[in-house]
Image: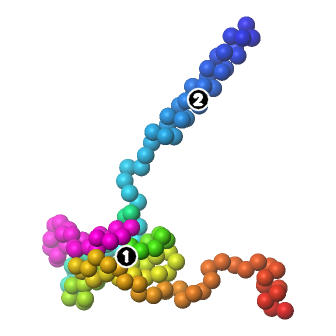
Amino acid sequence: MVVKRFFFVSAGLLCIVLAYHLGATGVTAAGLPVEGAQFEFDSGSNAYLSFSTNRAVYGFTRAVGGSAYAPLPAPSQPVPGTDDIVATHIRPAGDGGDYLVVLANGDAYYAPYGSNTWTYDGNLVGGVPTHADTWGGLKTHYR
């Protein structure tokens, strides 16, 4: 009788482990994550949409009264760096026509329409440390 109960408990645990394993490895994301999405209007009420996914930047525009967005020429090179993209921006062709991107560490890059290369434009943070010093480090610094 004890052997029969042990078999059923073991079989039940095996089923739970098997179900977890199949569920944990069989589920994947439906799409790529979108980073730094921005939606804006220019002075003529034309709409602009820019976003990044998988280090590639995309831009779209819709004219006043238009019903669909048209793609804008985007750089084919991925955005340099490894930090997350926190902001994107499209400057209309009349204002110079380029893409602007800001990374989580403050680095800013731009790429003109039709260009495939990103140019480093500086760091917005300006080298300010982003981590707190230890208590011992603070005491040593202010002695």
Q: What's the magenta region?
A: 55-78
Front-most of 65 and 36? Answer: 36
Circle 1 sits on which residue? 88
Q: CA distance from mark 1 to mark 2?
A: 45 Å
Q: Is residue 41 visible?
A: no
Image quarter of residue 48: bottom left
Q: Secondary structure at mark 2?
A: helix
Q: Which residue appears at 49% of the width and 40% of the height? A: 25
Q: Which residue appears at 17% of the width and 66% of the height? A: 68
Q: Is residue 33 magenta?
A: no
Front-most of 133 and 82? Answer: 82
| Residue 16 disc label | 2
Mark 1: amino acid? Thr
Task: Please identify the quadrant where the C terminus is shown.
Answer: bottom right
Q: Which residue appears at 41% of the width and 60% of the height? A: 33
| Residue 72 disc label | none
Q: Secondary structure at mark 1?
A: strand
Label 1 crowd bin: few (<14), some (14–19), many (20+), radius 10 Å = many
Count of number-bearing discs: 2
Percent x, y for residue 82?
48, 70
Q: Is residue 127 visible?
A: yes
Image position of 36 (left or right of 135): left
